[in-house]
Image: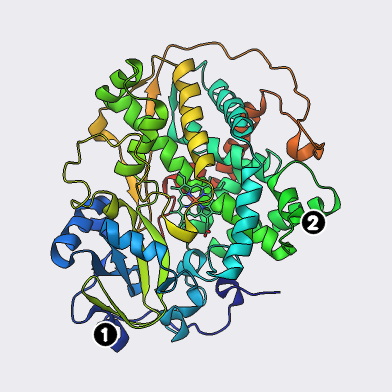
Amino acid sequence: MTTSISESGAEPGAANPPPECPAHAAFAQGAALTALSGAEAQHDPRAVYEKLRAEHGGIAPVELEGGVPAWLVLGYRENMEVARTPRRFTRDARLWREWTEGRIAADDPLLQLIGWRPDVVSYDGEEHQRLRAAVNECLARFDRHGTRRHVQRYAHQLIDGFVEDGRADLVTQFAVYLPMLVLSRLVGLSEEHGPKLVEAIVGMVSGGEEAYAHNQYIISTLRSLTEERRRAPAHDLASWFVQHPSGLNDEEVLNHLRLVIVLGYEATTNLVSNTLRMVLTDPRFRASLAGGLMTLPDAVEQMLWDDPPLLVCPARFATHDLQFAGKEIRAGDMLLLGIAAGNVDPEIRPDLDAPMHGNRSHLAFSWGPHECSGQEIARAITDTGVDVLLNRLPDLRLTVPQDQLTWTASTWSRHLDALPVTFAPQRRRAPQRRRAPQSAPAAPTASAPVEPSAAKAALAAVAEADAQAKAHSRGGFRAALVGLFRRRR
Ligand code: HEM
């Protein structure tokens, strides 16, 4: 069995480097490192990127939490080059000099995000091609209409959970759940797993003492699913992974299921929230939609330019000493793709107000061999989910002024805390008739169509998770959601 850096607990693993450390100084070539996790970056990450761009150009030395040095790629073209040239900039974290030289503690939460794992993200070359073929071919089996049908069903269920109240928070009652319900269904998990998995993923990416335990919960849930599907395949991603001709072993299957859920969930939640915010706050947008000047998919693309779900994407590692964008990069240096910074590079977007909708050449899903495999699923969840919501509640109104909306940002992403709305209360939809499964019969817990009351059940489970979290003095489930991606200081 292959062991990942983040699970080995073995050396290397001392403490993170103090700023006066010689390796740290050599990295910055004398320049001070700008903290990507400091108060300023969390309050207004874009302002920090622009300052760095003015000072350094296309690539700047920065510091992650714990004083870990890295290069942040700011230019659009530079991001493209790093993403598309694995010969010079590999995804393989086993080359990461900070780690090989023992400056990253074995329990550093950064390893959960950046550490090497036996999955498609961590390899380049032939092994990457083998794993990527499996991931892409299996994801492609969800035909467009099938995915949209699931999204519609879950969107309606979630809306049924609050439609009679005349008010809702579209972040914590809609955007946070829709992607997880859809992804859990695609992966093959039963719906009851949705809320618990959200909590575990939030806990894992938030870092802190419980990150390891949350990761273990996710792994053990997916391990059971993998074993079950080896015995009795169904119509879901777990079954297609175990059956794929590339011969994924159990460890590879569960690591890729984990990857789909963890990567897909947080980013898609951000995209749904951001798109809803735009719909509710930008009058030009609503008028363009209503007047047929812009479609919802166009609007989603505009969001992927202006407010990408991931601000910064970890990580590439220089394969050898090299010069890049005027900087001396040493073998093993970490480079971060600055997606948000690259998308507004003045070289390619001199006028940020010029509409970009319909143009898909943004960096939100990256480029090159590791370009996001699930982008069509993310788009389907977002535009179908928002469409269902707007159709059912056309009179949605934000209850707070736009400038009172708040975000929580980390090095990697920025998400809306809440989107409180009102609307004329409506009746819930009549219960839908069950549909027959489309192809291979599914295990009853995973793929059987659910009753419309599932939304109520999901929300009840959320309430229970909330109560449990409070009982354990962890600040509550909602607080954990708000703290998504906020990492240990
Ligand atoms: C709006 C939502 C999403 C965004 C913004 C997003 C963005 C990204 C980015 C930036 C990468 C890294 C590329 C790189 O390292 O160069 C990536 C990789 C990946 N994403 Fe997504 N993603 C989203 C949703 C999803 C979903 C829903 C799935 C699965 C259903 C998914 C599956 C993957 C996989 C498997 C990879 C690894 C590909 C590889 O390394 O070859 N993503 N995504």
Residue at figure coordinates x 29%, y 25% from the top left? 285
- Looking at numbered disc 2 in the image, what kind of residue is underneath it? Glu
Q: Residues within 10 Å of mark 2 (few under 14, many from 20)?
A: some
Of residue 294 and residue 213, the one placed in the foreground of this image is 294
The mark found on residue 227 in the picture is 2
Q: Quadrant of residue 89?
A: bottom left
At numbered mark 2, what does the secondary structure look like: helix, strand or loop?
helix
Residue at figure coordinates x 23%, y 76% from the top left? 327
- Which colour assignment does the render follow? rainbow
Of residue 281 and residue 313, the one placed in the foreground of this image is 313
Tell me residue 306's x, y (percent): 29, 42
**For the view shown, which residue lies furthest in the left direction?**
54
Answer whether residue 279 is visible to the viewer in this image: yes
Q: What residue is pinned by disc 1?
A: 26
- Looking at numbered disc 1 in the image, what kind of residue is underneath it? Ala
Tell me residue 314's x, y (percent): 42, 63
